[in-house]
Amino acid sequence: MARGPGLSARLKLTLSYAGFLAVAGALLLAVVWVFLLRYVPDNSRGLLGISPNRYLLVHTFAPAAAVAMAFLLVFGLVGGWILAGRMLAPLTRITEAARTAGRGSLSHRIRMKGRQDEFRELSDAFDSMLDQLEAHVAEQQRFAANASHELRTPLAISRTLLDVARKDPTRDRGELVERLHAVNTRAIDLTEALLLLSRGERGHVTRESVDLSLLAEEAAETLLPLAEQRRITLDVTGGAARTMGSEELLLRMVTNLVQNAVVHNLPGGGTVTVHTEECDGTSVLRVENTGVALPADLVPTLTEPFRRGTERVRTDDHAGVGLGLALVHRIVRAHDGTLDLVPRPAGGLLVTVRLPGTP
């Protein structure tokens, strides 16, 4: 926004210091006049025998007072300029750091030394903001690079299939259509997941009353054919667990958790348990599944975008796009909740989602 020229903060402080000294000096002279000079006898008519007299004191005191006032004014301007410069030096460093950050360099930090005061507090808050911005930008850049790579894969496969079909007109068109359909479905799923992930990251969430138990039943009913196909036992237990949030996003969260629990399971004989409850004003959703034992250092990375646990059991027909738990994490965070991943000692994973309950 364009602004007109104005006085600098340093000049304003300097004028304030000088003005304060000038007013203080004028008040001091007024006190001297009121409480001292007016009680001295007046000998302006030249009467003899009265010494000292007000006439002589006034004519002697006035020039000295004028010189003192001029000195105070000059001293206030010079001293005020120096003091204002010293006081505003930390603000100058903060301003330079802000300009550096505005030019795109987020690695610069102020790290102001000294005891705690308003400027140090502002400096520490600015450094903390830069830390968060740098981490967020790095995460977004990494996410964009991964997303571009993931989107490029199905497009490259589609182009390869089309090139093969063009060079070999006798190739079975039905098989080509099936494979193109599968590749395009995967690309569409990835695009929708990216859009939902971006929406959850921005925190644009419509708030309405949602029962997690109903969402769990709907997700289980949708994924029951997949569980039966893989011979996985899918159970939904617990009671109502109401929270405020977006029903669409929360349904996607529950569906992703249940689908992950089914896909990353023991083939032919595993179990998935979905449990909902309300506890101390918090709505809790737990999804627990059997499976292979997970390394402790792998579990914290599962919520990163495009992170796929190599030790987890999965098949090619449900390879996923690596955004399941990342999307769950963003949705939970957008709803002011917490997400806990705990590996089961016997194998598998216990996922616990805690969301604020309805008032």
Image (spheres, rainbow, N blue to C red):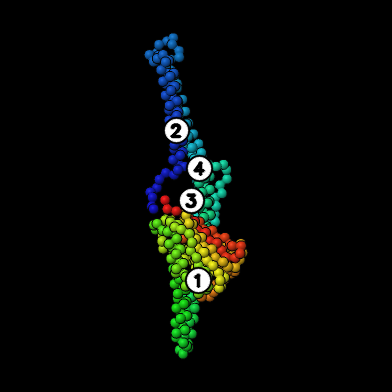
Question: Real-space Cα distance between discs 4 and 3?
Answer: 39 Å
Give the mark nearer the N terminus: 1 vs 3.
1
Give the mark nearer the N terminus: 3 vs 2.
2
Residue type (three-letter) at the residue carrying disc 2: Phe
Q: x and y percent of residue 40 in the render?
A: 43, 15
Residue at the disc numbered 4: 118
Which residue appears at 42% of the width and 44% of the height?
A: 7
- Crowd around label 2: few <14 · some 14–19 · many ≥20 (10 Å): some
Question: Real-space Cα distance between discs 1 and 4?
Answer: 60 Å
- Crowd around label 3: few <14 · some 14–19 · many ≥20 (10 Å): few
Give the mark nearer the N terminus: 1 vs 4.
4
Q: Are marks 3 and 2 in contact (CB under 8 Å)?
A: no
Q: In the rendered image of this protein, does residue 77 appear above or below residue 31?
A: below
- Which circle, 4 or 3, is nearer the viewer? 3
Q: x and y percent of residue 210 in the render?
A: 41, 58
- Which circle, 2 or 1, is nearer the viewer? 1
Residue type (three-letter) at the residue carrying disc 1: Ala
Question: Real-space Cα distance between discs 1 and 3?
Answer: 33 Å
Question: Real-space Cα distance between discs 4 and 2?
Answer: 23 Å
Residue at the disc numbered 1: 227
Label 4 secondary element: helix
Q: Which mark is residue 20?
A: 2
Q: Which mark is residue 280?
A: 3
